[in-house]
Image (cartoon, rainbow, N blue to C red):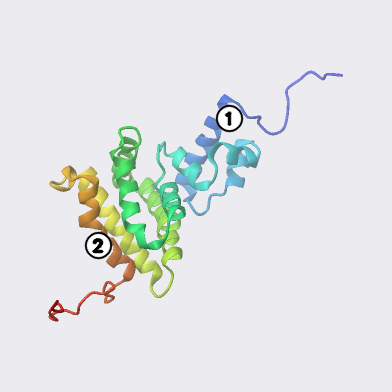
Amino acid sequence: MNKSGPRRGRRPGGPDTRVAILDVARRRFLEDGYHAVTLRSIAGEAEVDLALISYYFGSKKGLFGAALALGANPAEVLARVVAEGDLSTFPERVIRQVLAVWDDPVTGPPLLAMLKSAIDDDSLGGLVKEAVEREIVDRIAGLVQGREARQRAASFTTVVAGLIATRYLLRLEPIVSMTADEVVRFVSPQLRQALRGPGRPAPNARPAGRPAPSR
């Protein structure tokens, strides 16, 4: 027997459900910060099942990127790069992925808009800072491990951020006109040194002042 009257309980999946989740997530991220927000708390406030958030967005990183209207979430891009290969080719692969998403006419403009907004808006800037620390610096530190891993990871992130700022925000020449291969050739050595840390020469490097062996 059917009962009349409004239905109660969790919101079912539908066209408006994703929008409702994003509205709650965007507000909560800005108010409480990245770390404090949980998918469970967003599900409760949006009145949806937790599994539905996972279905739509996959993870907290995915929800964060969608809440900020990013076609490509840097944290998810990094996660793919980490999964694709070993540490020996990590700098080159990171550069190529950064250039791919920032040069893309679909995914690049929202990222640039977020960067400009983060500079002007302290709340958004703090949120982006926290997300970068948790999802990028910490992830790289876990990859490199060892002494001063987090400092090395932060240095690596600084070099990448400098590349993004000069190529896409300042549009500094000749960086903005370089091909991907050229950027890889000039920037990857800095990223490798950042991962090694100060005072750690590259493998097979000669000490300063020592001549190359004769052949």
The amino acid beneath tag 2 is Pro
Q: Considering the numbered disc 1 on the image, is that residue within a helix, a strand or a loop?
A: helix
Picture residue at 34% right of the left edge, 67% below the top: 152
- Is residue 21 positioned above or below 215 on the image? above
**215 and 112: which is toward the camera:** 215
The amino acid beneath tag 1 is Thr
Picture residue at 38% right of the left edge, 53% below the top: 129
Q: Is residue 187 left or right of residue 75?
A: left
State how far apart marks 2 and 1 are (Cα): 46 Å
Q: Quadrant of residue 143?
A: bottom left
Q: Which mark is residue 17?
A: 1
Label 1 crowd (10 A; few <14 / some 14-19 / many >=20): some
Which of labels 2 and 1 is toward the front?
Answer: 2
Q: Which mark is residue 189?
A: 2
Q: Is residue 5 left or right of residue 123?
A: right
- Is residue 122 positioned above or below 5 on the image? below
Q: Considering the numbered disc 2 on the image, is that residue within a helix, a strand or a loop?
A: helix
**36 and 149: which is toward the camera:** 149
Q: Name the outermost residue toward the front.
A: 215
Q: Name the outermost residue toward the right.
A: 1
